[in-house]
Structures are given as C-alpha cells and as structure tokens.
Image (cartoon, grey):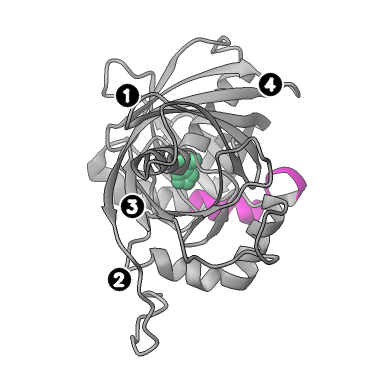
Amino acid sequence: MIDSHTEGEPTRVIIADGPDPGPGPGPGPLAERAMRLQARHGDLCKAALLEPRGHDAMVGALLVAASDPDCAAGAIFFNTAGNLGMCGHATIGLAVTLAHMGRIEPGAHRFETPVGVVGVTLHDASTVSVVNVESHRLARDVTVEVPGLGPVTGDVAWGGNWFFLVKHSPVALDTAAIPALTDVSLRIRRALEAAGVTGRDGACIDHIELFGPPTDPGARSRSFVLCPGGAYDRSPCGTGSAAKLACLAADGLLAPGEEWVQQSIIGSTYRLSYAPGPTGGVIATITGQAFVTGEARLIFNPADPFVQGIRL
Ligand code: PYC
C-alpha cells in the first residue's frame, strides 16, 4: 500500500494483493465490483483503515483494472463506514501515487470510479486537477429541526456523494471548535434521517458541510465537512466542493469558468471552477496537491486480538 495526503486528508492506496472484488480476474462494471467488495470484503477494507493500522479519517482506494480501456486506472473508494461513490481527494492522491510508482506521467488521464469516469490532469509530481462527474442540486433550503439546536436550513446536493450544505454554520469555523462542529454535524445528520430527508431514490445523506467566511484572503469560503465514519475531512472535500459549485451555479452566484477557492477547516484549499453539465448540473474541476507519506505492507495476523481494527 502507499499512503498520501491531499491537502491534509489521508488516502491509502491498496496497490497489490488486495481483496478481489471479482468476478475472477479481469474487469466488469465498476459499480457492481464496488458493491461486491463491500458485501464480501467490507470488514477487511475497514480493518485496513482503522486503528491500529490507520485512523478513522483515512480513505482507502483499491486499485483495480478499469473496464473502460481508455482509463489509466480504476479505483473503488471506501472509508471506515463503507464505500464512497467518488472521492475527490483520494483521486488526487491516487494520481500522485501512480506518478510516484512511475505508472503515469504528467498530462491528461482518465480514471474509472464506481460513479463514472473522471478526468485527471497531473500537472507536476504533486499538483492534480480532477474533472468530476456531473454534480447537481436536488433541493434548496430544506429546514430540519435539530434537537438542542433548533431549525437548520441547507441544500441537498450530489457531487459524487450526497451532501447537506449549510450556508451559515451554527458554530464558528475554527479549529478549536472541531469537536463542537463534529457534534453539531452529527446531530444534523441524525435529524435529516429522522425527518426522512434523503438524496435521490432514498439515498442516505451521509456528508454534512457547514460553511462560513474564510480566513485565507484568496479563498471565497471555508468549510467543515463531516464524513460518513464520523471523522471530518481535513481537505475542503472534493466531492463536497463539487456539490457546493452545483448550488452556487443553481443560485446564479458563480459563472461557468469563474474560479472558486474553497478553504478547509485546517486552512488548506482547492481551486475550483465548472462547466455546465449535460443534464443541468455542473462539471466541476477540482485542483489540489497531494504528497506521498509512506509505503508499507499491511499484515493481518489472526493471533492479533485487534486484527479487525479497534471497533468501539
Ligand atoms: O474529497 O470527495 C472527497 C472526500 C469524500 C470523503 C472524504 N473526502
């Protein structure tokens, strides 16, 4: 495996000897392979990320053969809670990892993900632009009653995963407030579930984004993003930033091609812009940097009482 971080958010790429999402060797539709991976090997994927091997902020990317011959790679993304449809930071991390391995050169590439093919431009050893699948807003100004907090209003949007985007965070966006931001986001997520607010076809809204003013004068917004496992995204969240662009575009607040710099809770940034999508959404381009932090082989010793990771 090779570890990296993208704007502070870790990615663990399983490059060889990983679980087989089947059927047998060779490609098949990646969305189906992703579902099989979760059903058959979900515990192993989780164990690869959890403490003591990793920690709950880690996102895994299982490198697989793409079914589309034009793609340089295929990847199935997962975190400690299960599969992710797409993952912006992990795609950037994967591109830098493949360059580190000598498998791709600077230039334009295509990667296959369970939600579709994304464009990837490796600008140099660490800087990558991802052209995401089409993002769209499903619902505007949805208000839910959050116990202990009162009414909270946000938009429901998809950027490769489902997000609830709250324009004005009820807690100040400050690193000292990360425990409070986490607590509030978890309560909002539970309130959405209780109120039956979902993504399309009843999909669970498993990411919560709270927005506020940036501290970086070059950025236009700062965000705190709660991920499905309960950890917060150290980066501005690639798919979450794409969902944000879909909302800005739908509100007429950002023109095609105009730059948007999104700052994360820890201060790192993505540069973003969009082109109109074929079905009324946006095709977001997300640019950020990743750095390889380590290479290792994971060992799963059956005699280890924590072989499955620490599960509390
Ligand atoms: O960058 O899209 C992203 C992401 C999703 C969850 C963690 N990072």
> N-terminal of the two: label 1 or label 4?
1
Q: What residue sits right under mark 3 in the picture?
A: 3
Residue 281: quadrant of the picture: top right
Residue placed at 27% from the left, 32% from the top? 267
Give SS at disc 1.
Answer: loop
Q: What residue sits right under mark 1 in the picture?
A: 214
Q: Amino acid at mark 4?
A: Gly
Residue placed at 60% from the left, 44% from the top? 113
Circle number at residue 57? none
Q: Amino acid at mark 3?
A: Asp
Examine the residues drawn in magenta and state their main secondary structure: helix
> N-terminal of the two: label 2 or label 1?
2
Q: What residue sits right under mark 4 in the picture?
A: 277
Q: What residue sits right under mark 2 in the picture?
A: 52
Looking at the rendering, in which quadrant would you find the C terminus?
bottom left
Left or right placement of residue 106 versus residue 7 in this view: right
Region of the chain picked out in magenta, as a range: 187-201
Comparing labels 1 and 4, the label whose residue is closer to the camera: 4
Label 2 residue near ligand 1, CB within 8 Å: no
Give SS at disc 3.
Answer: strand
On screen, residue 140 above or below 254 = below
Q: Amino acid at mark 1?
A: Pro
Give SS at disc 4.
Answer: loop
